[in-house]
Image: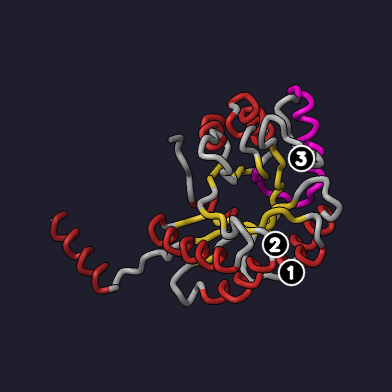
Amino acid sequence: MIAARSCLLALLLASGSVATSPPRIAIIIDDLGYRLDAGQRAIGLPGPIAFAVLPGSPLARALAEQAHDSGKEVLLHLPLQAKPNDTIQEPLGIRLDMSRSEFSETFEEALTSVPHAIGVNSHRGSLLTRHPGHMRWLMEEIQARDDLFFIDSFTTHESIALKVAVETGVDARRRDVFLDPDQNPDTVVREFERMKRLAKKRGSIIAIGHPYAATLTLLERELPRLVGEGYELVTISRLMQGDRVVAE
């Protein structure tokens, strides 16, 4: 009987009689907070795009409020130290030489500066995401606040952020595709197509882009076509609710 049912299901799937869920795509636009024109253009993108706002940036609060008022989800784009002798000093960034209390105070101030944040994603961080102690501190801060989740922007393959998140019970996931590792329009087209291929292969995917002109131009043109091509564009919160990861 079981074998007969399996054969019937296979036939139905082959004939298209059984509906399958379309591949799901969640897109985050990072680095909002410094340019009003680019930020507003990004917020105007069609569909449930999420926006990651840099804490302490001049337009952080205004753009986070505008995104929220437009029905878009907001993330805290938390700066994490990228290299040992990092000369880039970003407002409210987390550094390796911070004490536990300094870490906690900076995280709280960063979160407060970005209203409506429902999750945290990392900005830079190729150094800090490799350090288990600081990643545990970060996950403890996230866990202490109800309903926050974490997205590892995954700027280094040595990142242990996802592993520590799973160990501490924080809902977390890793970025799958950078849409714009550079601002060449051909690169953005290439990575957008790779995003779609990976979505079909994996079932769901997180893509990160930036408010570059090439990226926004492509997304304005291509996002309305995704449904017709058999994809579902979803909010990052919905993707997180549906997907659970395990430590690798």
Q: Is residue 70 placed above or below 240 in the rendered structure?
A: below
Left or right? Give the position of 40 relative to 199: right
Identify the disc placed on residue 41.
Answer: 1
Decide: marks 3, 2 in contact (CB < 8 A)? no
Q: Which mark is residue 88?
A: 3
Name the mark nearer the viewer: 3 or 2.
Answer: 3
| Disc nearest the viewer among 3 and 1 | 3
In this rendering, the answer to whether 61 lies above or below 107 is: below
Q: Quadrant of residue 133?
A: top right
Q: Which residue is drawn at the image coordinates 65% and 38% (left, top)?
A: 125
- Determine which residue is flagged by label 2: 211
Give the Cα separation between the discs numbered 3 and 2.
20 Å
Amino acid carrying label 3: it is Ile
Sequence-first tag of 3 and 2: 3
- The residue located at (23%, 63%) in the rendering is 9
Residue 12 drawn at (x, y percent): 24, 69
> What amino acid type should be assigned to the residue bearing mark 2?
Pro
Query: Which residue corresponds to the image point at 41% horizontal and 64% vertical from the top-left?
Result: 21
Residue 112 belongs to magenta span:
yes
Q: Which stretch did the figure color magenta?
A: 98-122
Tell me whether the residue at label 2 lies in contact with that at label 1, contact meaning CB atoms closer than 8 angstroms. yes
Q: Is mark 1 on a helix, strand or loop?
A: helix
What sort of colour scheme is used for the picture? Answer: secondary structure
Position of residue 204 in the picture relative to residue 46 (left or right)? left
Q: Is residue 214 left or right of residue 107?
A: left
Q: How far apart are marks 2 and 1 (CA)?
A: 8 Å
Q: Is mark 2 on a helix, strand or loop?
A: loop
Q: Residue 163: x, y in percent?
A: 51, 33
Was residue 97 drawn as part of the magenta stretch in this picture? Answer: no
